[in-house]
Image: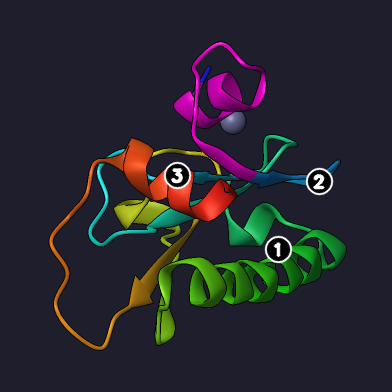
Amino acid sequence: MDIFCKIINGEIPSFTVYEDDVVKVFLDVNPDVNGHMLIVPKKHILDIYDMDNDTLLHIFKITKEMDKLLKEKLHTEGLTLVQNNGLLQEVKHFHLHLKPHYSEKEELLPVEDVYKKLTK
Ligand SMILES: [Zn+2]
């Protein structure tokens, strides 16, 4: 079983920022920037080719909501989305990276601290 299925079933703990019946959103434990998150479908879906359009649309709807949360709580200025399929995909379970931008370079904080800011 891949690491994201284990996070979804609770076998591995995560800093979950949002979840519903379709997706789970949690902080990347090796972030590139503060607030780096992953949106993952709860159903084991390999990649974008394997994904139905309703799930795809839902993921992007939640992406916009997470962007609002990042702007409100971390004062971010924008967002880069990264999603690999095929050769470059390391974990074989669809995941979309949300990497927020800041107007000035930020020191990386412990993930727990970012989590507290996002969820308080
Ligand atoms: Zn999986």
The image shows residue 6, relative to residue 97, as above or below, that is above
Residue at mark 2 to residue at mark 1: CA–CA distance: 9 Å
Report which residue position mark 3 lands on: 115
- Locate residue 6 relative to residue 27 in the image: left or right: right
Q: Please report whichever mark, 2 or 1, sits nearer to the chain's N-terminal start.
A: 2
Residue 13: x and y in percent read 50, 20
> What amino acid is found at the position of numbered circle 1 in the picture?
Ile
> What amino acid is found at the position of numbered circle 3 in the picture?
Tyr
Can residue 81 be seen here? The reply is: no
Report which residue position mark 2 lands on: 22
Report which residue position mark 1 lands on: 59
> What amino acid is found at the position of numbered circle 2 in the picture?
Val
Chain part drawn in magenta: 2-17
Q: Residue furthest top?
A: 11
Quarter residue 72 falls in: bottom right
Residue under the point 34% across and 43% down: 113
Quarter residue 67 falls in: bottom right
Label 2: how many Cα within 10 Å (few below 14, some 14–19, many 20+): few
Q: Secondary structure at mark 3?
A: helix
Residue under the point 49% across and 16% down: 12
Q: Nearer the viewer, residue 78 or 94?
A: 78
Q: Secondary structure at mark 2?
A: loop
Residue 63: x and y in percent read 63, 69
The image shows residue 96, relative to residue 102, as above or below, that is above
Residue under the point 37% across and 58% down: 36
